[in-house]
Amino acid sequence: MPISAQATADRPAPGAVGGAPVGGRGPVPGGRAWGAWSGRLGWAVAVAVPVAFLTVFFVWPVLEIVGRGFVVDGRLDLSGFGEVFARPRTWRVVGQTLAQAAVGTVGALVLGLPGAYLLHRCRFRGRGALRAFVTVPFVLPTVVVGVAFRSLLVDGGLLGGLGLDGTFAAIVLALVFFNYAVVVRTVGGLWERLDPRAEQAARALGASHWRVLRTVTLPALGPAIASAASLVFLFCATAFGTVLVLGGRRYGTVETEIWIQTTQFLDLRAAAVLSVVQLVVVVGALAVAGRARARTERALPLGGPEAAHPVRLRDPLDAVAVVVTAVTVLGLLAAPLVNLVVRSLRTPDGWGLDNYAALAVPQDTLAVSAWHAAGTSVRTAVDATLLALLVGGLVALVVSRRPRRTSARRAVAGLDALFMLPLGVSAVTVGFGFLVSMDSPLGLPIDLRTSGVLVAVAQAVVAVPLVVRTVLPVLRAVDPRQREVAATLGAAPGRVLRTVDLAVALRALGLALGFAFAASLGEFGATSFLARPQDPTLPVVIFRLLGRPGAENYGAALAASVLLAVLTSVIVAVCERLRRPGIGGAW
Amino acid sequence: MTTPRTTRPLRRIPLGRGAVAVAAGCSLAALTACSAIGGASADDESSAAGTVTLVTHESFGLSEGLLEQFEDETGLSVEIVQQADAGALVNQLVLTKDAPLGDLVYGIDNAFASRALDEGVVVPADVTAPAAADAAAYAVPGDDDGALTAVDLGDVCLNIDTTWFAAQGVPEPTTLDSLLDPAYRDLLVVPDPVTSSPGLAFLLATVGAFGEDGWVDYWAGLRDNGLQVADGWSEAYYTDFTAGGGDGPRPVVLSYASSPPFTVPEGGDEPTTRALLDTCFRQVEYAGVLAGAANPEGAAQLLDFLLSDDVQADIPGSMYMYPVSSSVDLPDEWARWAPLSDAPFEVSSTDITEHREQWLTTWSDTVIG
């Protein structure tokens, strides 16, 4: 192994050792100007495509709607700031937003890290099924989470004795319920690629399990943990339905306030001010996360021998992971879901599958059956996922470079943060922004607002950051010298990309694919504010069923929710299979 | 501490990796064959007489075949665009005034009607259906040209679980005032008026009942008597209400006068719930031709169709509202178990538009704190 020997001694600190110049061209043999040009062109396209996508489908709509709040009769009017900040309620909701997001993030990390370890670093029967299962909460529509959670917590419910209904604790539990999978997947993706030999060596030198965890493993996982934390923080800070359903407006956040000001009062001025406040909070959080990431990011020894080991209960690390994960999965994730399944099996005269039989026929006057809607959901999700993979993949590739020039490095970091924003900006703002900007996008005579295409696009906008955050930690862990070596050995830039970057990225592809699919199936973000074409997706059908009286509708809504959950688990499990061939490969 | 590197020479990166990538790409491409974007364009063929687009809320629905019948008769093809939130519907229409989302809107209720009129999102249309005369009885005051046409109506009322009250031996409450009685402590759940349109309707009922000066005190009384506020109708009815199907803890809920027939148990012939007809607010749902509509003639035809006997007779079964037309019969169950209130509380649409925000703020300060 002639190449590996020289890259062994130490790990380069981020940016300190000369990485590939922006564009990632290794040393280009002289006289091959064409190669350099096509390389540069390639990178320009890699930057331009995602930026154009984000500008048209995110930045422009948001500016359009926020602008309406600040421009009155053609003049800039910023008096809204003074007014909104004079309300004590504003400060309270900002405080509550930060508190909920912070506590939710810490909770998700504390419970999620042992889960990531167990589900990605240990081997046991049913691991694949469990991995798919923990993703389910992530896609459940809020109304369903409301039913699943609250019917346990209300007086007389199974857990009614805890007195949690309508409390801060209930909201935080629901936020953790929702975001657990985010931590497991984001951190697990890197963890399972981490060469176990560093830990083994440390152990052999006499370090305790905990010392190894603290000094070797966790620092190596730093970027992924920071990634996960920033995702969860953004999800929590913009949680909307969860907060309203479980806590009510007493626990209102900036997000719920924007929703009320926009949809109920049409007070665009107040909404615009709050959107700016939200942006400040989000950018602040991203900056903190970015700094934490940069501090810990480095090329990592990935791969090596099969990292996952059979669970050893005598190993204290494994034991803790098993206990924490069992309690979390059974107590927090499974309880509401089982509650949902049990309720879906209840019929007017006892128990049975009546509610599931009802899914095959159009309920009431919904025009389509739940099965048909599930098909629509999957089709839309395919579009959104493809779009998100294309855009997110390009962003991850560009952002994974560590250019030498400070300005270029800043630009790359800025690009990274920019693509996180869709998670941190209010869905109402984006949704209403679409309404006022997409009637003839870019002057084209197509009304995108009422077409199904926009639904997929809106889902993709939210799925892109998930793809980036899943693929990026793995790509960044690639030692830049590996690319240089490949180039030195005569590989053309395209070949370097293919054989080094793409090969590594493919490992994370399954995770990213599953994540994007789940986000799309779960209909996050602006989707709920879009004008819907007639063919509804499954979450919309569930929402409509729950909006009608009658035990049959209620039962069918619950059965449809279970269908959505099963559909998600199956798709996520299949996506994970996609990367199987990578494991045990030559790496 | 050193770490063994695991980098392998380039040539050992197996070709199989590329094959996997290609295979993954291909299977994704195969999936796009059934993608929504790919399929969407197929629906775009417009019929001879053109397309008419109906903008409405999530509760819209008609029995199978009705819209097709309209399309056959007129040669128009109908597209439906639905918004998740009924309350947000008018606001979205206001925002898109310059480039309307469609031709006809259905589902603007009396709480938002005057905002729609003030903002000029709808324009007068000629309605020729016989039911137009019935609809005129519900015209929005001040809307002299008939820009909004009433299509259906319903009463938002408190519902009680009669079985629960019988089993507990507690006399049933009958009026708004009776709910202040300590005997009914912790029994009531209502949806938040800020986040739910029936919730807003009930707030308006109390404004109508107790007046500008009295309603705040009434809510303070409810609050002190253990009122529960849920986020939306679904949460209140299905999770908190004892008889909604979810086995919640509270036997009094805000719902509709039309809800009781849905609680007739299998094999039984009487509902287990009852609407309190002295606690109601009347919701009227309007339709109107959108200003700047691409197909105003088609929109007017569709509006006429909504007032036709066929649709009017279908409304109770499909949208749980009462038809405005006096010439169609209500379903038997409705006639028996879901009568409208004789004297619903009223607040004028103008008053609502003028005070809604202030009322909601006061309500929030009083009840939510």
Image (cartoon, coloured by chain):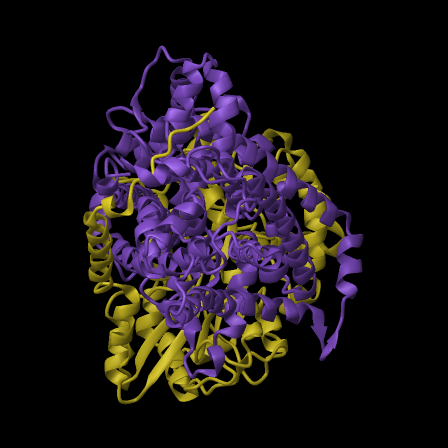
Chain colours: A purple, B yellow
Extreme residue in the front direction: A30
**Image coordinates for residue B30, horizontal then vertical, percent:** 20, 61
Residue under the image location 26 percent in, 89 percent down: B48
Left or right: residue A353 versus residue B101 is left
Q: Quadrant of the C terminus of chain A?
A: top left
In-front residue for pair A314/B257: A314
Q: Is residue B348 above or below residue A9?
A: below
Compared to residue B61, the image places residue A547 above or below, namely above
Residue B218 seen anywhere in this rendered image of the structure: no
Q: Position of residue A184 (x, y in %)?
A: 41, 35
* Image vertical order of residue A383 relative to residue B270, above or below: below
* Percent x, y of residue A171: 55, 36
Q: Residue B28 appears at what percent x and percent y? A: 24, 58
Residue at 49% in and 50% down: A19
Which residue is at the front of the view, A494 or A231? A494
Q: Nearer the viewer, residue B93 or B166?
A: B93
Quarter of the picture containing the N terminus of chain A is top left
Splitting the image into 4 quarters, where does residue B22 fall? bottom left
Up-down relation of residue B143 to residue A149 (above or below): below
Name the residue rendered at 67%, 42% in the picture.
B368
